[in-house]
Image: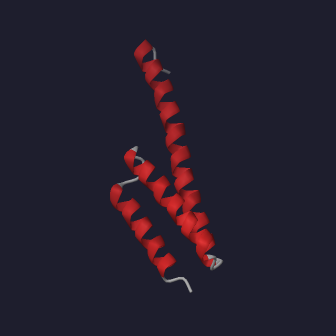
Amino acid sequence: MANIKSSKKAIKVIAKKTEANVEYKARVKNSIKAADKAIASNDKEKATIEVKKLQKNIDKAVAKGIVKKNTAAREKSRLNSKLKNMK
């Protein structure tokens, strides 16, 4: 345990930020799963909506530095190509 007052505060701040980052990562992962599920069910309208939500969530995560830019681009590209190839 830290003894210095600023270190104690830093521990609290880090815990709070970590919790927020975990929430954003979970939101992105859940969006990916939802989009994959919609694509697998061959529901074009629902899949389009889910992919748009996913892109929004990924872009927010990139802006906050939680997900790397290239990783985000790769995920969006893969899902867009899946959406495009839907029957």
Residue positioned most to the right: 41
Which of these two is toward me, 58 or 45?
45
Picture quarter containing residue 74?
Answer: bottom left
Residue 12 spot, x, y in % from top left: 50, 25
Identify the coloring. secondary structure
Residue 41 spot, x, y in % from top left: 65, 77
Using the image, determine if residue 24 lies above or below residue 36. Answer: above
Picture quarter containing residue 68?
Answer: bottom left
Q: Residue at x 40, y 43 (%)?
A: 64
Residue 21 spot, x, y in % from top left: 49, 42
Q: Residue at x 42, y 53 (%)?
A: 59
Q: Residue at x 47, y 19 (%)?
A: 8
Picture quarter containing residue 43?
Answer: bottom right
Residue positioned most to the left: 70
Q: Residue at x 34, y 56 (%)?
A: 69
- Residue 81 visible in the picture: yes
